[in-house]
Image: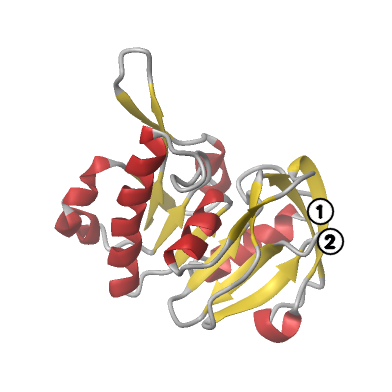
Amino acid sequence: MHNILITQKIFIDKHNQINWSLEDNWFKFFSQKKVNLIPINSNINNKKKLLAFKPKGLILSGGNDLYNIVKLKENLIRDNHEKEILKLTIKNKIPILAVCRGFQFVAKFFKCKIFKTANHVRSTHTLKINNKVFGSKVKILKVNSYHNYAVSQLPEHFNLIARCSDNSIEIAKSNKYNILNFMFHPERRNISQKEINKIVFSHFKIR
């Protein structure tokens, strides 16, 4: 059984209580493999406990916005939380998958620009894959889209794998830090789902 850490969306209820939630599709996505998803919240403060799971990887999931874009308390809490878990996993050379907001967060962490985009909510995009970088036989991916903000540039140590037609970056990877970034959601339905599954499992070295 492989353990994979995954971050969660935060919302504050009518009683001003902080709640953490994770889309059930993530559990369905990994149900075909022997994977134990471990949702993390404020237990990031106990770093030794997280490392004791010997995680096979970390997923920075979607949901919420970055605090510098939408200044809500829950966004600030999540930004601070994910900054610590990202530093922890990079330091311990744990593979990372950053999805949608997760990709935006990684870009911001490395001081790259995020911009407002259009026609990326509840739509489908066809992506041409840069095989020279990716080392994959896949040439085209048809993916979902659910974001209002996108990444326009990458740090030097990131490789561009695919752009959308509006020039926003959809897939990128840092071999230096072993971070795979998707602007789409692999856990939700995609036309190219089988190919996407293989890419994710390969990244985490899960057979």
Q: Is residue 120 left or right of residue 27?
A: right
- Callout 2: 10 Å neighbours few (<14), some, many (20+)? few
Q: Is residue 160 left or right of residue 83?
A: right
For the residues marked 1 and 2, what is the alpha-carbon distance in whole angstroms? 8 Å
| Viewer can see residue 92 | no
Determine which quarter of the picture holds residue 171.
Answer: bottom right
Q: Amino acid at mark 1?
A: His
x and y, in percent, of residue 148 in the image: 66, 44
Vertical relation: 53 (above or below) 65: below
Marks 1 and 2 in Cβ contact (< 8 Å): yes
What residue lies at 38% left-to-right and 18% top-to-bottom? 13
The residue at which mark 1 appears reads as 125
What residue lies at 40% left-to-right and 62% top-to-bottom? 57
Q: Amino acid at mark 2?
A: Ser
Q: Is residue 9 left or right of residue 30?
A: left
The residue at which mark 2 appears reads as 165
In the picture, the quarter occupied by the N terminus is bottom left
Task: Name, please, the residue furthest toward the top.
Answer: 14
x and y, in percent, of residue 103 in the image: 54, 58
| Viewer can see residue 190 | yes
Q: Secondary structure at mark 1?
A: strand
What residue lies at 35% left-to-right and 62% top-to-bottom? 86
N-terminal label among 1 and 2: 1
What residue lies at 36% left-to-right and 53% top-to-bottom? 82
Vertical relation: 2 (above or below) 38: below
